[in-house]
Image (tube, grey):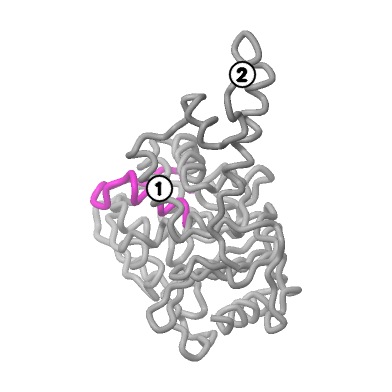
Amino acid sequence: MRCISKRKLIGILAAVLSFSLAVGCGGKADIENAYNLQDAVESYGLKASAEEQSSQAFFAEGLCVAGSEDVLSENVTAALSEAAGLFNLQEGVMEFGKNIHTRLFPASTTKILTAYVALKHGNLSDTATVTAEELQLEEGSSTCGLAIGDTLTLEELLYGLIICSGNDAANVIADLVGGSVGGFVEMMNEEAKALGATNSHFTNAHGLQDENHYTTVYDMYLMFQAAIQDEKFKELISAETHLGKLTNASGESVTKDWASTNRYLTGESAQPEGVQVIGGKTGTTNAAGYCLVLYSEKEGAPYISIVFKAGSREDLYTEMSELLEEI
């Protein structure tokens, strides 16, 4: 399915123009060729500058503006998950899509946006000291083992965030980059909307369950696609292990062994022949089910594949492997 389309933009502008023509600013306006999109846009002062037009063209380039219809394959056991998608970044084509606009809980795949915002607005060499409040997490929550008084750089925090899905690292990053968790969450929502992920809303930096914390497969594709433009982000998601370095409350140097939760990187799940999984992010909660977002390549061509709300870890990797085999 070829994905670039102006239909959505035209629909929005038509609705705006319809309302404006009806109520105006003090009365009904008469515009020659009112239903000519170009004339109407210019008449209402909505014409973008050359710089804005260039920016908009760049934003749309290679992106998939997909409709509501599923694009399925008999080779993919789609019943194993609630939603899934396979996006060919080189061709700008969605090769598989199921419920890609359905709002679902993202669990720790949230940390893709957390890392994106931190890399965009933070400085890797900045340091933070862990507080007691930042370690207040649900029992059984995944962490990278931080303790009160530990001091470490944003770069180390990002490894702990992505490799072992540290919810503790997420809170420390939020305070460091956003000034507070609330401030950072505002940044997350602003960046998501700027990327076109308008069907999402975030309430925290880690992805632990909240009814008002949700996204879609398509929105996650947009956010992940933006994140992988940063070489540091690709380095983070592709790391199988990392030796985290920090200073504890006593001033002693401490190292932490962090290992990836991605079974393709650990070798627990085999990569389909000819496909190289570069990396990605896992996520699991009772409400979200099992989730996985991947960046892969085949003969140099890049792909993003996403599975949301699989019923088990085995189902998650079965369906993801089937998606990868579609490449």
| Residue 186 is covered by the magenta coloring | no
Residue range in magenta is: 112-135
Q: Residue furthest top?
A: 26
Horizontal and vertical percent for residue 214?
63, 49
Which residue corresponds to the image point at 70% horizontal and 61% vertical from the top-left? 99
Between residue 170 and residue 103, name the one nearer to us: 103
**From the viewer's perspective, is residue 30 above or below residue 262?**
above
Q: Crowdedness of circle 2 by 10 Å Cα count: few (<14), some, many (20+)?
A: few
Horizontal and vertical percent for residue 61?
43, 57
| Residue 134 is covered by the magenta coloring | yes
Amino acid type of disc 1?
Val
Q: Quadrant of residue 191?
A: top left
Q: N-terminal of the two: label 1 or label 2? A: 2
Which residue is label 1 attached to? 117
Horizontal and vertical percent for residue 266?
46, 81
Which residue is label 2 attached to? 30
Please state, as top left, top right, bottom left or bottom right, where the N terminus lies in the image: bottom right
